[in-house]
Image (cartoon, rainbow, N blue to C red):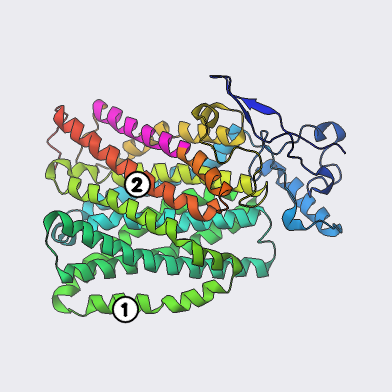
C-alpha cells in the first residue's frame, strides 16, 4: 500500500504555507491498529487519512465504537511491530463536537470560580486576612495548584487513557496509586515553598518580619495544599475513568472540572484553616509548628510509593522545575492582589480575580492537553513529526488554519465573551463584590479577559510543541507554566483595569463597602 502523506495547510491572510506533516513522514497503514479493523475504512477513504489533517487528538463520541472494535481486533492479531512504536491516526472532530464537549465543563468550571470569588470577597474582611495580609499572596499560588498538580494529573491520565495505558485493572491501579502519591509530594513541597515566597514578598516592601506569622503561613499553606490535592486528585481519577466509559474525550472535560472544584475547594480550605490556626496561635503557640512538622514528616512515605511506578518516578525526579517556577510566577500575581485589594478603593477586585484567572487557566489547559495528546499519537517526546515544533508559530496559522488544533483554539477563544457575561451576570444577581456593573467596567473587564486568553492560547501552541521537540513531556511541563502565566496576566490586567477606571472617574458608592 502506498504511504499516506499530508497536504500543506495554507493561511489565507498571508499566503504562508505550513506543513502539518512533511512529505517524507509516512503512516504505515498496514501496521496501524486502526487499519487492522475490517471495514474501518474503504479503499477510497484510505487516501484521505493523514496524521495532521482535520483529525481529533483523541476521538469523539460517534466514533468511539469503531475505536473499541479496532482495539479488540488488534489484540487478536499477532504483530511483530512493537505496539509502543505504532502510530495511531487521530480521528476527525468538528468544531461543533469540540464546543459541545467543552461547553458544559467550561460553564461548570466558571461557576466554580464565581463561587470562589464570592468566598474571597467575604473572607477578605476576616481578621486573619486583615492582620496577616500575606495570606493574599498565598491565594493565587495555592489556587494555581489546580494547574500545577490537578490539571497536570488530569492531562497525564487523559493521555494514558487515550493511548491505551489504562486498559486493565492492574494498569489503572498502578497509575492511580503512583499519581496520587506523586501529587501529595508535590503539594507538600509547593505549599511549603509558597509560604516562604509569601513571607519574603510580604517582608521586602514593609521590612517587617514576624516569626509567628511566618509559621502560620507555613502551616496554613502546607495543610491546604495537601488536603485540596487529595480531594481533587480522587475526583480527577473518577472523571477520567467515567469519561472513557461514556465515550467522551477526557481532555475536553477533565481539566475544566478540576478547575471548577479546585478554586472553590482550595480557597475554602485556605480560609477556614488559616482562620482556625490564627485563633489557635493566640492560645496554643505550638499548634502551628506541629502542623508543619506533621505534613512534612509524611513526605518520605509518599516518595517511596511514587518511586514504584515508572511513569511517576520520572516526574518525581525531573518534574520539579515547572511546578516551582509556576508557583513563583503565581506568587507575583499574589503580591499584585495583596497590594491592590489592601487599598479600600479597589476592594471590589477580589470577587473577579478567581473568575478571570480561572477562565483563562481552564481554556489554555484544555488546549495544551489536546495538543499534547495529538503529539503523543504521532510518536514520543523528542521525535520530529514534521510540524515545525521548534519554530515560533505564525499567529495566523495558530488561529485561522484548518488544523484541528487551530479549530479548537478558535472554539475556546469564542467561549470567552459569552462565558464571562454569564459569570458577571451571576455575580451581579447574587449582589457579590463592591463594584457596580457599568458598561465601561464591562468593556474594560472583557478587554482584559480577551487579551489574557489570546496571549495564553498563542503561547500554548508554541510552548507545547517546543517542549516536545526538546524531549520534554508537555503533559508534565506545559500546564503549570501556562496556568501560572494566566494568573499573572489575569491579576495584572484586572488590577490595571481597576486603576484606569478609578482614574477616569468610574467610581461608585459601593466601592470599599
Which quarter of the picture shows residue 488? top left
- List the residue tagged with mark 1: 293
Which quarter of the picture shows residue 198? bottom left
Determine crowd level at label 2: few under 14, some 14-19, many 20+ residues with C-alpha closer than 10 A: many
The one of 458 and 471 positioned closer to us in this rendering: 471
- The structure residue drawn at horizontal position 18% and vertical position 67%, both measured from the top left corner, is 213
Q: Which residues are magenta?
A: 440-458
Figure check: 220 above or below 124: below
Label 2: state its secondary structure: helix
Figure check: 82 above or below 341: below
Q: Is residue 80 left or right of residue 183?
A: right
Q: Mark number for residue 487?
A: 2
Measured as percent of width and height from the top left, residue 167 is found at: 69, 61
Determine crowd level at label 1: few under 14, some 14-19, many 20+ residues with C-alpha closer than 10 A: few
Q: Quadrant of the C terminus?
A: top left
Figure check: 35 above or below 171: above
Q: Main SS type for the magenta part? A: helix
Q: Mark number for residue 259?
A: none
Query: Of label 1 and label 2, which has the lower sequence position?
Result: 1
Amino acid at each position: 500500500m502506498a504511504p499516506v502523506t499530508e497536504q500543506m495547510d495554507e493561511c489565507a491572510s498571508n499566503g504562508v504555507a505550513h506543513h502539518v506533516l512533511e512529505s517524507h513522514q509516512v503512516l504505515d497503514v498496514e501496521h496501524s491498529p486502526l487499519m487492522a479493523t475490517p471495514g474501518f475504512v474503504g479503499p477510497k477513504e484510505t487516501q484521505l487519512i493523514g496524521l495532521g489533517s482535520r483529525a481529533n487528538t483523541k476521538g469523539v463520541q460517534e466514533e468511539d465504537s469503531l475505536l473499541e472494535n479496532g482495539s479488540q481486533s488488534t489484540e487478536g492479531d499477532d504483530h511483530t511491530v512493537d505496539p509502543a512504536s505504532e502510530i495511531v491516526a487521530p480521528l476527525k472532530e468538528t468544531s461543533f463536537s469540540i464546543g459541545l464537549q467543552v461547553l458544559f465543563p467550561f460553564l461548570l468550571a466558571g461557576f466554580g470560580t464565581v463561587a470562589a470569588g464570592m468566598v474571597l470577597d467575604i473572607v477578605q474582611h476576616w481578621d486573619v486576612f486583615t492582620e496577616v495580609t500575606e495570606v493574599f499572596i498565598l491565594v493565587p499560588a495555592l489556587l494555581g495548584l489546580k494547574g500545577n498538580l490537578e490539571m497536570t494529573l488530569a492531562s497525564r491520565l487523559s493521555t494514558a487513557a487515550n493511548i491505551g495505558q489504562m486498559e486493565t485493572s492492574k494498569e489503572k491501579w498502578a497509575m492511580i496509586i503512583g499519581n496520587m502519591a506523586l501529587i501529595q509530594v508535590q503539594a507538600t513541597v509547593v505549599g511549603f515553598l509558597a509560604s516562604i515566597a509569601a513571607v519574603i514578598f510580604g517582608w521586602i516592601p514593609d521590612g517587617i518580619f514576624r516569626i509567628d506569622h511566618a509559621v502560620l503561613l507555613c502551616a496554613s499553606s502546607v495543610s491546604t495544599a495537601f488536603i485540596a490535592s487529595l480531594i481533587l486528585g480522587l475526583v480527577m481519577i473518577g472523571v477520567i475513568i467515567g469519561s472513557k466509559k461514556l465515550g467522551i474525550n477526557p481532555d475536553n472535560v477533565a481539566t475544566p472540572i478540576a478547575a471548577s472544584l479546585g478554586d472553590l475547594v482550595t480557597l475554602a480550605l485556605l480560609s477556614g484553616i488559616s482562620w482556625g490556626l490564627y485563633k489557635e496561635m493566640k492560645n496554643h503557640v505550638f499548634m502551628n509548628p506541629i502542623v508543619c512538622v506533621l505534613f512534612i514528616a509524611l513526605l518520605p512515605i509518599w516518595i517511596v510509593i511514587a518511586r514504584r511506578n515508572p511513569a511517576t518516578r520520572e516526574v518525581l525526579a525531573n518534574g520539579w522545575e515547572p511546578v516551582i517556577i509556576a508557583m513563583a510566577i503565581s506568587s507575583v500575581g499574589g503580591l499584585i492582589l495583596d497590594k491592590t485589594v489592601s487599598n479600600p478603593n479597589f476592594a471590589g477586585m477580589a470577587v473577579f480575580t478567581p473568575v478571570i484567572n480561572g477562565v483563562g487557566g481552564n481554556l489554555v489547559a484544555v488546549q495544551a492537553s489536546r495538543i499534547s495528546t495529538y503529539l503523543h499519537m504521532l510518536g514520543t517526546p523528542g521525535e520530529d513529526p514534521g510540524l515545525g515544533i521548534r519554530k515560533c508559530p505564525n499567529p495566523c496559522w495558530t488561529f485561522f488554519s484548518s488544523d484541528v488544533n487551530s479549530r479548537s483554539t478558535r472554539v475556546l477563544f469564542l467561549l470567552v465573551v459569552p462565558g464571562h457575561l454569564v459569570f458577571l451576570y451571576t455575580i451581579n444577581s447574587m449582589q457579590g463584590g463592591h463594584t457596580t456593573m457599568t458598561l465601561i467596567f464591562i468593556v474594560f473587564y472583557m478587554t482584559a479577559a480577551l487579551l489574557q486568553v489570546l496571549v495564553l492560547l498563542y503561547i500554548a501552541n508554541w510552548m507545547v510543541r517546543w517542549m516536545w521537540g526538546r524531549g520534554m513531556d508537555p503533559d508534565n511541563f506545559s500546564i503549570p507554566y501556562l496556568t501560572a502565566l494566566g494568573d499573572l496576566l489575569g491579576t495584572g490586567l484586572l488590577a490595571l483595569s481597576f486603576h484606569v477606571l478609578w482614574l477616569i472617574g468610574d467610581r461608585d458608592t459601593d466601592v470599599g463597602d
